[in-house]
Amino acid sequence: MFRNRLSFFDFLLSLREKDSFGLETTRTKKKTMFSRKKPLGLLLLGVSFLLPPPLPAFPLSIEESKNYRDIGKYFEYVIVPERESSLDRVLREDTFWRPNPKATISFPRVKNPLWLRITLIHYGNLPHTFFLHFSSPVVDVFELHSQVKGKWVTQVSGEQVLQRNKPIYSHIPAFPITLSPDETRTIYVKINSANPIFNFVSVYNSRSFIAFSKKQDIFFAAYFGAGFMMFLFSLFLANTLRYRKFFYYFFYLATVLLINSFSTGFMQYVEIGNSHTWKNYLFPITIYLTSVFGLLFTIEFLETEKNFPKATKLTRGFILLFISLIFSIFFLELRNFIQLGVTLVIIPILLALSISLMALFKSKKKLEVILFLFAFGSILIGAALNSLTVQGLIRPIHISSYSLPLGSAIEVFFLSMALVLKVSDYRKATEEKQEIDLQMKIAQKLQNGLLPQKRTHANGHALGFRFSPASDIGGDFVQIIVKDNEIGLFLSDVSGHGIPAAMIASMAKVSLQIWNDSLDKPAYAAERIRLSLLSSLSGHFLSAFFVYLNPKEKILKIANAGHLPMIYLDRMGNLEHITSYGRAINEYIESQIIEKTLPLPDSGTLVLFTDGVIEARNATTGELFGEERFFNLLQKLKEKDPQTICDQVINEVEKFQKSKRSDDDITILAISLEKNPI
């Protein structure tokens, strides 16, 4: 009893005498300090007699009949400087061992080697091999030292140890300890780690440890097997569908599997070169990359950019943060770099959950969002259970032992189900697109049939033509009819554009056969065409301009159905608008088209165009091309041939609107009145 009280008195003194590593200084220094603080020492000596003595380090009894026992709280520890960290040093009498304060071995900020000590005794009838198991594989090196038959034996495990012939449980930091009946043995364990140290320590009998090891192997084999299959499936989806969300999912799944290879210890099986130091850097970098690809996948999958622009900006900000943190490895100490990653990884999980909750109330496709919510909820629960297990608040048994890989497995399952639904939607969309593409090809063939065959002259008169549709299919079309000494020009603009406009234009072209039989009667033909289209317009209307030319008799006849006037451009650059009365062809009001006959000039150019020319809009300023700019351009081209006029007009319009696509179809048709053009 007195010896124990003196030991406690020495402990109180050592609080002032020990260095920062938990070791006592020399006894000479102790005596000097005691002599200087004699009154205080006497006071502490008196107090020590009133306090209960500290518990002696009795041997911990382990029995073969018990499957396992948690023993973390029975350890004593000491932290030794790297330069002094040897077994001989910790075996010295002046080494001060402290009782472990928690049920776990938890020293997240310790940089120097951590030494643990425990004394075990086996009360049994036969020798038995027990297994000392440490729960966390993310520690660089475990060294176990024990004295067997008077000789010190060292066993080594850990990521930084190259083990070419690994046992089946080599991914689990575990050490076999064989004890004879009533044998007492003191075990010293050295943990040297660049990572934060968290371990739950248990001792198993041989039968329960083998069962535990096999169970883990089966579980993790199934997990990584399924994960690898999903990895290949995601790669197939990414390569086949070429959607960004599938690429992000592929990289996210790859990083999740890589993290779990660390958390389960299977990364120990990967040996590159003669060192495992690279794993200390790969582990936190993988955490940051998982956060980056997880957030990118969230943005794409939940389509946050159009639904939640503010949340998208916030998410992108965190993505840039995690990318920048990867490069902080060049400035931060490795331990702090790892600790920062482990702490911040909760941010993308909570952010993904928040966005999915927002999408749940707004999205019409609820099931996909619910699966996404369950996915990230499961990884959050798994990570939380893993953290609580590592901290020793939850015993590492049953589900808590596999919480992180199990949570990520459930996450991958739900995300895969959500992606299957996405793939189904994409397949339907693809089938619909293929159907639309087929219709577009048919419509494009119709469109090509609406355009005049490539020709440069009509009865010796030079022709020019250009067509620029607003979409793949337009509603403008041109017809040129040539007979002996007669020329018919027809330009039409169907309201709207796309397939409906092209279909109506196609039907209008069929109706033009009526005009072919009476080319010198454009107004009569226009009325007959209107009557033939009444039942097919379906709310659409079309404007059209009919031109009849008879160069031999110098006759020009026109009929205008609500279209823009025709331009006559003489060789001096003068412009004249030629038109007649008439409404656009529609199903509600009669067109009342009036035919006009005019003398045909000997020279100059006639120009027909649709409103897409003058209504072309500048993409930057919103300004219209306008009539004035168009007319001035024509005047500059007064001596050019018709095709050059058409080409220059289209080029100037595209240059003005800064795009080759406009809001409306653009068509221009020109004919020279000279039989031998300039």
Image (cartoon, rainbow, N blue to C red):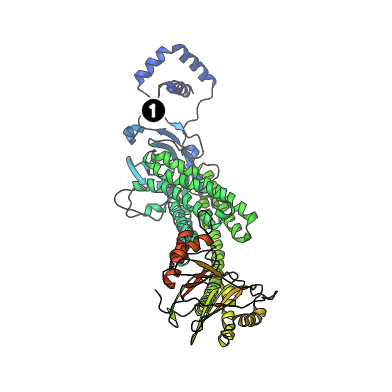
Query: What is the three-letter code of the residue carrying label 1?
Result: Leu
Name the spot of residue 357 as percent of width and height, x first: 61, 52
Residue at 44%, 69% (x, y): give it: 571
The foreground one among 403 and 411 is: 411
Residue at 49%, 43% (x, y): give it: 344
The foreground one among 614 and 311 is: 614
SS class, disc 1: loop
165 versus 599 height, above or below? above
Horizontal arrangement in the rendering, residue 536 relative to residue 471 (left or right): right
Residue at 62%, 80% (x, y): give it: 523
The foreground one among 82 and 381 is: 381
176 versus 469 height, above or below? above
The foreground one among 302 and 398 is: 302
Name the spot of residue 316 as percent of width and height, x first: 50, 48
Report if residue 126 is visible in the image: no
| Pointer 1 residue | 23
Report if residue 162 is visible in the image: yes
519 versus 491 height, above or below? below
Classify the position of the C terminus by image quarter: bottom left
The mark tally for this picture is 1
Q: Which residue lies furthest to the left in this view?
A: 274
Q: Residue furthest right?
A: 588
399 versus 13 height, above or below? below
User: Quadrant of the rendered structure where residue 463 is?
Assistant: bottom left
